[in-house]
Amino acid sequence: MIKSFIFFFFPLIVIAGSNPKSAKAVRTPSPIHVDGVLDEPEWQLTQPVSDFKQLRPIEAAEPSEKTEIRILYDDNAVYFGCTMHDSDPDGIVARLARRDDEVEADNISVRFDTFHDHQTNYEFTLNAAGVKTDILQYDDGRREDLAWDVVWDAKTRITRDGWTAEIRIPFQALRYNETQIQEWGFQIYRWISRKQERIHWALIRKSESGGTSHFGHLLGIEHIPMSGGIELLPFVLGTGKFTTVSPEYPNGKEFTFNGGGDIKYRPNSGLTIDATINPDFGQVEADPSVLNVSTFETFYPEKRPFFIEGNQIFQFNTFDEESGLFYSRRIGRSIKVDEPTNGTILDQPHYASIVGAMKISGRIANGLSIGILDAVTNKEAARFSDSLSNAYEKTVEPLTNYSLIRLRQDFWDNSQIGTIVTSVNRDDRIPTFTGGLDWNIKFLNNFFRIDGFWAASHAQPKRELLEGSAGKIAFRKEGGSHWREALSLDYTSRQFYINDMGYFRRPNDYGGNIQLQYREDVPADWYQNWQSTLNLGTRFNFDGA
């Protein structure tokens, strides 16, 4: 009976990445000077990609303006020569903004699925004013790592016939398979702002689900160097403190020195080994000010370079994009010291300093992604003064070790199943463990998806031993004409606690949820982009273990 079911069901599975469109890159004998003007004779070595289709306002219609993209490469980089024709050059919207700020403007976007796993892609977007955006997308384009930044060159020019762009993307910025002949997933988008017109090279219809899995193919890249080598980034820091003469500072001044560094080693194009000793994050962008008047902890995105590398592999999300078993901001977390009764704070640490950390992240053979992390934070003490001006010290953060192992396996070309184990060991309490299993199974041309997770925790916050679990399963119809629906079930036990290394906004939120969502999409040629959505849900509570 099982064999009969498989025989019936398997032909219905449409393999991801089966889009027949392909573009070809041609090797250039000399590098391209990136200035926004396609005047190098090497651009004539390749035929332009020009067969685009509208996504909106009219799906599958011919674009109102012509677009031509030429692709070259050498041993160091891949180049794009982009010509965006426009019948009204004065109407081109070109706005300046900060990098990664996607303001409303005309833009061109190229994207690579270098591992051809139909899940992860690198986005390089350039607007008509030359503002660059680079994003790492994963989970078939549903999720993004906005903190991912690499070095690449691009210039634009507005002409009497439209606007042009030259783009140079170093191979060193990308990760790809260790093969002599490369075949990448590939996509190009163009946005014409004043017309609100979006065009695709490989058209992804509104009735289709997913993004990366519908890319076309980039051929022709051969015999490029494998990305490897070692990068070293040491630092030395000196500080001086000048104050009034006191018993604590008899000379009225104090000098301190500090040092450390980062090491990055790539044994091949798929794996990256990162190590850091006494890291300094003084150059990292500060968190924005947040006025939090709720009882819940504020979530801050990760911006520290060491933790950004391979971040999409380590993620194990639970109930939303923020909640999960791994929240890297726990490592080196900020420390809040309360003012003692009948005393004052003389000196206090602001965060738990990281003694050292190491991680391995990447993708190995047969579609297996791996993430291993180990980090140690130092013991931190604050100095206080009592009512009699006697100084004393008190430990406010113990010596702590954080460990994590994350595995995720691809199958069916566009589905995954994964597992994670984390541990936190502190000097003053028993070890904390969490573990989980997650899955994302797609079938019938990505129209249907079954996803979810199950996780368990063993923790001791505030000297109380807690053991709990949580889980979720959802069945979704995400493609097809007109209607979409989703049915989800989830639960959280009373003693589920993951906030030693993870993030859960409501650790005391226990119970279950049943939700049914129905959405009706009206065809694009009738009141474009109109939708009606109906949500039906109920939540029940129970006395969890």
Image (cartoon, grey):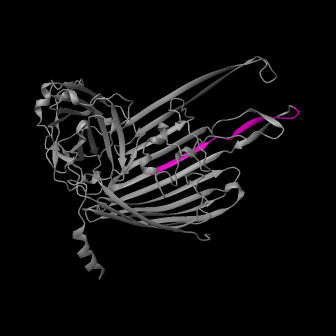
Residue 321 in the image: state x and y as whole percent. Answer: 46, 52
Residue 425 in the image: state x and y as whole percent. Answer: 63, 52
Q: Nearer the viewer, residue 363 or 267?
A: 363
Task: Name the image quarter holding the N terminus.
Answer: bottom left
Residue 408 in the figure: left or right of residue 19: right
Q: Residue at x 15, y 37 (%)?
A: 65
Corner quadrant of residue 309? top left
Asked if residue 303 can be seen in this view, the reply is yes
Q: Residue at x 67, y 35 (%)?
A: 349
Corner quadrant of residue 128? top left
Q: Main secondary structure of the magenta part?
A: strand
The reply to whether the magenta stretch includes residue 428 is no
The reply to whether the magenta stretch includes residue 385 is yes
Corner quadrant of residue 92? top left
Q: Nearer the viewer, residue 110 or 362?
A: 110
Q: How many marks?
A: 0
Q: Residue furthest front?
A: 527
Residue span colored magenta: 371-388
Q: Is residue 143 above or below residue 450?
A: above
Q: Is residue 182 above or below residue 253?
A: below
Residue 89 in the figure: left or right of residue 474: left
Residue 94 in the image: state x and y as whole percent. Answer: 28, 29
Asked if residue 476 can be seen in this view, the reply is no
Residue 403 in the image: state x and y as whole percent. Answer: 55, 51
Task: Name the image quarter holding the C terminus.
Answer: bottom right
